[in-house]
Image: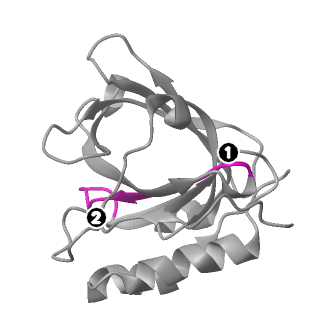
Amino acid sequence: MTSKSSGPLTFRPPSSSSATASSFAKPSTEFIKGPWHVTHSTLPMWKKNKNVVITYTPLESPPGGIDDLVQYNPIDSDKQKTVEGIDKPDPSVEAAYNWRGKGWLKVASSHWEVLGYGEHDGGWMVTFFEKTLFTPAGIDIYARRKGDLSENLIEQIRAEMKKVNDPDFQQQADQIFEIKHEW
């Protein structure tokens, strides 16, 4: 797959990092909204699952809020599972959200941030999520379209991650694995 480039990658370290961020323009809600295929991750639970898609739908209230629907299948099943929540913008961090589960997951919460995004390969986004009671801190890489991102773009993302002056974050770049999808 050929990478359709639209300039250099836009990238920043997570807010929890001691590394200094260069200028970063947050993505618009228009860019974030809609379905995203999670193609790569460091989150261990995705090793046992496939066809991971996150759909973001803007909400009128709270302002800047996003309905967050995660859909996936266990690796050995076609039965779809879902995780639903609401993302509220974090007022202290640009391009960051505080997630709260819906239904029986209402007790669960997490913090996630957009670290990078662009139009290469039809649209991509890198998110960082902080450690929770249920998951370690980690990275997800999203593709807008079905069919994965080019290996060239994945390597560019890894290289940008390794440039961040934070050893813990740099290590995440080496732990990224591909998530199975049935395109």
Q: Is residue 93 left or right of residue 73?
A: left
Q: Specify the color scheme.
A: one colour
Q: Residue furthest top?
A: 60
Q: Quadrant of the N terminus?
A: bottom right
Magenta stretch: includes residue 124 = yes
Q: What is the tally of numbered marks visible in this picture? A: 2
Q: Which residues are magenta?
A: 122-135
Q: Label 1 amino acid?
A: Arg
Mark 1, residue position: 144
Foreground: 132 or 2? 2
- The residue that label 2 is drawn on is 14
**Residue 11 at x, y percent in the picture:** 42, 65
Residue 47 in picture, x, y percent from top left? 60, 67
Q: Is residue 103 left or right of residue 183?
A: left
Left or right of residue 111, residue 83 in this image: right
Report whether residue 125 is seen: no
Rendering coords of residue 93 (x, y %):
19, 48
Instruction: Tell me: residue 22, above or below residue 65.
Output: below
Q: Residues within 10 Å of mark 1 (few under 14, many from 20)?
A: many
Q: What separation in Å lies between label 1 and label 2 (alpha carbons)?
A: 22 Å
Residue at 35% from the left image edge and 65% from the top image edge: 12
